[in-house]
Each structure stands twice: as C-alpha cells, then as structure tokens.
Image (cartoon, rainbow, N blue to C red):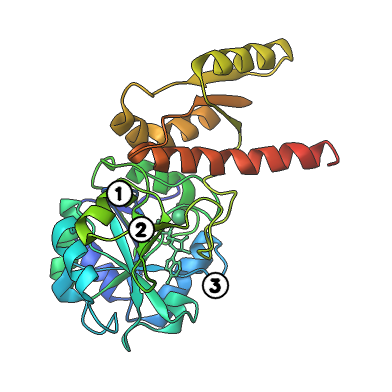
Amino acid sequence: MPSPGEGLLTTDLDVALDRLRAGGLVAIPTETVYGLAADADQPAAVARIFEVKGRPRDHPLIVHVAGLDALDGWVDEVSEPARTLGSTCWPGPLTMLLRRGPRTHDGVTGGRPTVGVRAPGHPLAHDLLVRFGGGLAAPSANRFGKVSPTTAEHVLHDLAHHLEPGRDAILDGGASSVGVESTIVDLTVTPPEVLRAGAIDASEIGRLLASSIGDASGPSRASGMLEAHYEPECLVVPSETIDEARRRVADAAAAGRRAELLDRTDDLVVAARSLYADLRDADARGLDELVVVLPPATGIGLAIRDRITKAAAGGARRRDSSRGG
Ligand code: TXA
Ligand code: MG
C-alpha cells in the first residue's frame, strides 16, 4: 500500500512550477518556515489553502514575490520606506504590510485594504519565484493553530492526508535556517508598527527607516495573530530562569507527569532554528510538559519569547477546561 504522502516530496523546481501553474498547492521551503503556496492569481487555488490548513477564510495571506520589482499590481504603491526596507532586507525574513493593488483579490486579504508582501531568502524559494514570475500566496504549511513546519518532513507529517499526489507537491529544501516566521511591519501607519516579531527586530527597522517604530506585537491587533498559536499537544511551561525551570520540572515529576527542560539560551540563533522541531519532538516522545527557559527580550529573543508564550497559552487553556475551568 502506498504510504500517505508518497509522490508529494520533490526537489525538482519544474515539478513545483507545473503544479503551481496548474492551480495545485506546493509547500515551499523558506528561511523562516515552510509555506503552503498557491498562485495568488488563481482564486480557486488560494481558496484550497484554507481548506487544507483548516484555517478561517478571513485570515489574510502573505503574497510572496521574487523582489521589489515584482510588486507591481500586488500593492498600490511601493512607498519610500518600503523601497528602503525591501532593498536592504529582501530577499529575507521581513513581511511589509502595504495598501493592496488591483491584482490582489479578496481571497488573499480576507477583504482587507492591505496586503502583506515578502521576498523569501531561501535560494530554492527565490529561484522558484524568479521563474514563476507572479506572486505566491502562502501561510505557514501547518494545520491551523499548530506548530509551524521547518522541514519537508514536518509538512508531510501535518498535511500528507490533505494534499493530493499528482496535483500538489512538497518542495524539499532542507531545514529552515531562521526557524521563526518573518517580522511583519505595517507601513500603512505612521510611525510604522511591528505586528509580529521575527529575526529582523524593530530597532533595526527603526534604524533603517530613521524613524520611531510602534510595537503592536504580543496580544496583537493583527487579525489572525491569536494569543494561542503554535500549539503542540504537550503543555509548554515558560520560565524566566533556569532555577525556576528546574523547580517546575521537579514539581511535574513529583506529580507523576513526564516533564523535560529545554534551555537553548546560550545560542539564540540555534534556539530559533530549533524551536519548532523541539516542540514537535516533545510531542513525538509523548511528554506531558516541556519547561522552556525564556531568552532575554532583545533581538530574535523577542520572537522566540513570543512563540513560546503563544505555544503555552493553548495548553494552559486546555488544561483549565479539563479541570472544568
Ligand atoms: O515567515 C513567514 O511569514 C511565513 C513564510 C511561509 O513566509 N508565513 C507565515 O504566514 O507565517 P502565516 O499566514 O502563517 O502568518 C502570517 C500572519 C497571519 O497572522 C496573518 O493574519 C497576518 O500575517 N497577515 C497577513 N496579511 C495581513 C494583512 N493584510 N493585515 C493584517 N495581518 C496580516
Ligand atoms: Mg502560521
């Protein structure tokens, strides 16, 4: 019997291009996380992304392009700040929110007047976009609310039963190097606001734009950025210090729960790169609790703290409701 997902994995750009042009879905490697891509010009293909992810229709998608020159029609205007950030941070882990252009349809933005655009830096994604020419609408390639994928195997694990060999594909480009989703900066407001923390932090954006930057990340006003997100099966327990974390692991063990400690605060680049694989691994090993030491709240540490806090929120909610709370 063929295993689920057989015939989905490929390293062949031509296969990926054929599937996308024919209106199929292709999971693409990016430096942040894997995305589930469709031709942004094909509303039916874009609509299928929501079905496969199990994601509400009104959550907007990012349009991925090869670079600044490929933004024509997707955005209303490439403003001066967009040009500055695009020319310094692209291709790379930055999404810019701009007013949408006529080519961006409602299925992509959930009817919003703005659109998120990003040129990913992963060489395979970049080559794909250069050859594709158009825009690829893509959210992270996980089921809605779950942990994002940073390898092709993660995508296969999550979506094999929802994708169709021969129609869709998973383009294997190895493990994502950054490991957390792109920074989202809203350039439609003054001063610009960071809606989601990522590898490029607000201070760097402020320096590049010579402007102050508002911080709207955390419990965010950006639709679709729910407080509980990136949610594994096990309970994630954030801890500010290693001593606190050790106490929590001991307490859990005393109560008969399988708990482990995760401390990658010595290298935050590795911490970000490994975070989602660490969460998935905790589930694969059947842990009840993963006690995670939080990094300092600067640079990419902010993005890591944000994802850990959101991964923790869902488990805490589930635990409370199972207690009847
Ligand atoms: O790194 C990334 O950004 C990855 C890779 C695949 O590029 N993509 C990604 O997409 O994380 P997604 O859909 O999982 O997260 C994008 C977030 C969502 O919370 C969405 O609601 C928000 O960006 N977003 C997208 N367009 C928006 C818009 N026009 N206005 C407000 N929020 C928007
Ligand atoms: Mg996502």
* Residue 295: image location, x then y, percent: 42, 29
Tell me if label 3 and label 1 are in contact, CB under 8 Å: no
Q: Which residue lies furthest to the bottom in this view?
A: 102
Q: What element carries label 2?
A: loop
Which amino acid does the dot numbered 2 rest on? Ile
Q: Name the residue under label 3.
A: 57
Please name the amino acid that badge 1 sits on. Answer: Ser
User: Mark 3 and mark 2: span between their CA atoms?
Assistant: 30 Å
At 51% from the left and 26% from the top, the residue drawn is 292
Direction from residue 239 to residue 187 in the image, left or right: left
Label 1 near ligand 1 (CB < 8 Å): no
Q: Which residue: 62% across, 42% down?
A: 313
Could you tell which of marks 1 and 2 lies nearer the N-terminus?
Answer: 1
Ligand 2, image quadrant it occupies: bottom left
Label 3 or label 2, whichever lies nearer to me, is: 2
Q: Name the residue under label 2.
A: 213
Residue 283, position as x, y percentages in the image: 54, 31
Q: Which residue is at 43% across, 82% downward?
A: 113
Secondary structure of residue under mark 1: helix
- With 271 as the anchor, is 221 left or right in this view? right
Cβ atoms under marks 3 and 2 closer than 8 Å: no
Of tags 3 and 1, which is closer to the observer? Answer: 1
Q: Please state the total of marks drawn on the protein image.
A: 3
Please state which of residues 53 and 316 is positioned toward the viewer in this rendering.
316
- Spot occupied by residue 130 in the image (x, y as percentages of width and height): 13, 67
**Which label sits on residue 203?**
1
User: Looking at this view, is 68 or 152 the one in front?
Assistant: 68
- Callout 2 environment at 10 Å: few (<14), some (14 to 19), or many (20+)? many
**Is 290 located above or below residue 49 in the figure?**
above
Which amino acid type is marked by label 3?
A: Arg
Lower sequence index among marks 3 and 1 = 3
